[in-house]
């Protein structure tokens, strides 16, 4: 199909099966902010979303990738840290030399190998964050700071390494904020619209970068952030993108008109293939595809302050992932490497723990679709999440039932139904009950963050 530069035409773009099937992606936040690698410990974004206290959030921003903004807020913890560690006269832009020196040690294939071991199906690299530094030597260089880019073509090497491992490679670009074009210090949510560069020079600059990421690197996602300058004809950009890469997808962060919702968050009405809740998940099955993005800790960029207490446990990571997939979501799980590209050990441990669970239970995740309902529970209160594939139902227990048999509420299995534990071999004994189906395990459940029952054929549901 040939797309026309109109909203009506780009809205006909179907969601590609690869993105629907992928379920797990790896986000990578890597840039100048990885050199200081520091932010205060102020909790996760979800806590701020609940309170709406955005001024407190920005003054104590736990996102290390926002270091440049936090440093410019008078009296902030980041400003104090910067002065004590680097000196008050040390510019943020001076980190460029340090980053380029450190990045010479980066081994892109080590990332590809790790992401493959985790069973990620795609990966997304931040090509330019809000500080404006680009991870590739663009044909359209920054007009204000000479050589403000990576010496190595980190983007190109990333794409080659990811594709070389059989994953889909994609790119992030901060179209809405660039502090080299608009240095407004963001201290509250209402400051964000004021900080979006709207001048024609930036419109041309950002558009040229996106065209380069499409034509030069064939990014399979346009993962934009925050917003986009209002003067851009996005229908033209999206139509050209789909005509070049029909299997590509566009996220929902190309906001050109700002509106704050009742909860104080930005409401978007722009065209998109998928939504992107951050450090959050939807509570129900959504017809529209979505992707939850979050760090393993409370920051996307590397934060040297974060220890085990700030990192998701493997158990919570697995259970959150299962919940997201049951409701038609993907998980874009972030890693924040050090400046030299090393992924910190705590992050590696969590990734490999998720990968080990998927070694056994991946059939319940990949290529699946939501079922009639997303969730239920056992008679002793263990949460259950459902996915389906090829006429079969996967029921994932989010904990270990305390006793046997245990009942899963709402399931109506026909005679001859087979129920097996993924990772096991023999069919399990089961019987119909007034409330659902009671299952008896042949052996004690192995230690695992979650346990998956394969039920064939898929039963009916009756609450």
Image (spheres, rainbow, N blue to C red):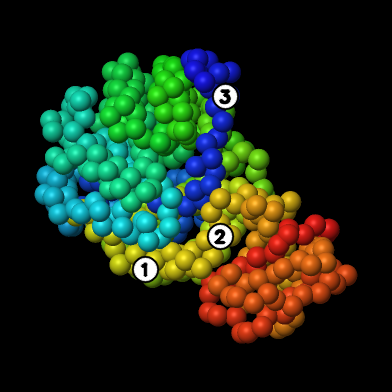
In whole angstroms, how far apart are the C-alphas of marks 1 and 3?
40 Å
| Image quarter in which the C terminus is found | bottom right
- Indicate left or right for 241 with 366 as reference: left
Q: Position of residue 40 (x, y in %)?
A: 34, 58
- Indicate left or right for 198 with 392 as reference: left
Q: Are marks 2 and 1 in contact (CB under 8 Å)?
A: no
Q: Position of residue 298 (x, y in %)?
A: 41, 57
Which of labels 2 and 1 is toward the front? 2
- Indicate left or right for 189 with 195 as reference: right
Q: Residue 449's image quarter? A: bottom right
Q: Earlier in the sequence, mark 2 or mark 1?
A: 1
In whole angstroms, how far apart are the C-alphas of marks 2 and 1?
22 Å
User: In the rendered image, which residue does mark 3 sit on?
Assistant: 11
Q: Which residue is at a point 37% across and 21% down the rendered structure image?
A: 198
User: In the rendered image, which residue does mark 1 sit on?
Assistant: 349
Viewer-proximal residue among 89 and 44: 44
């Amino acid at each position: 199909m040939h797309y026309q530069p109109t909203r009506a035409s780009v809205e006909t773009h179907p969601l590609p099966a690869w993105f629907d099937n992928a379920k797990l992606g790896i986000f990578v936040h890597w840039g100048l902010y990885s050199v200081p690698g520091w932010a205060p410990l102020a909790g996760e974004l979800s806590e701020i979303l609940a309170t709406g206290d955005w001024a407190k959030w920005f003054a104590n921003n736990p996102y290390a990738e926002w270091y440049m903004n936090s440093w410019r807020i008078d009296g902030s913890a980041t400003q104090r840290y910067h002065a004590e560690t680097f000196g008050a006269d040390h510019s943020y832009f001076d980190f460029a030399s340090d980053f380029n020196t450190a990045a010479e040690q980066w081994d892109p294939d080590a990332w590809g190998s790790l992401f493959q071991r985790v069973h990620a199906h795609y990966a997304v690299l931040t090509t330019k964050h809000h500080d404006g530094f680009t991870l590739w030597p663009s044909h359209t260089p920054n007009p204000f700071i000479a050589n403000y880019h990576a010496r190595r073509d980190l983007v190109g090497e990333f794409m080659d390494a990811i594709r070389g491992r059989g994953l889909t490679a994609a790119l992030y670009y901060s179209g809405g904020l660039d502090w080299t074009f608009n240095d407004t210090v963001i201290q509250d949510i209402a400051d964000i619209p004021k900080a979006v560069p709207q001048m024609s020079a930036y419109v041309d600059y950002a558009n040229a970068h996106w065209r380069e990421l499409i034509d030069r690197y064939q990014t399979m996602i346009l993962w934009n952030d925050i917003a986009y300058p209002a003067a851009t004809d996005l229908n033209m950009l999206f139509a050209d993108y789909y005509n070049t890469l029909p299997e590509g997808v566009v996220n929902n962060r190309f906001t050109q008109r700002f509106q704050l919702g009742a909860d104080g968050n930005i409401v978007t009405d722009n065209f998109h293939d998928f939504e992107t809740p951050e450090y959050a998940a939807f509570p129900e099955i959504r017809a529209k595809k979505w992707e939850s993005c979050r760090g393993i800790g409370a920051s996307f960029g590397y934060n040297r302050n974060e220890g085990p207490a700030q990192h998701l446990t493997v158990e919570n990571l697995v259970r959150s992932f299962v919940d997201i997939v049951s409701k038609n979501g993907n998980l874009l799980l972030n890693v924040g490497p050090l400046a030299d590209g090393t992924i910190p050990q705590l992050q590696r441990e969590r990734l490999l723990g998720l990968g080990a669970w998927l070694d056994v239970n991946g059939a319940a995740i990949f290529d699946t679709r939501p079922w009639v309902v997303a969730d239920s529970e056992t008679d002793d209160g263990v949460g259950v999440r459902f996915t389906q594939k090829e006429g079969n139902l996967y029921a994932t227990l989010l904990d270990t039932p305390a006793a046997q048999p245990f009942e899963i509420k709402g399931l109506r299995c026909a005679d001859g139904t087979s129920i097996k534990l993924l990772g096991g071999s023999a069919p399990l004994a089961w019987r119909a009950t007034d409330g659902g189906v009671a299952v008896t395990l042949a052996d004690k459940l192995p230690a695992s963050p979650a346990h998956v029952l394969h039920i064939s054929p898929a039963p009916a549901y009756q609450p």
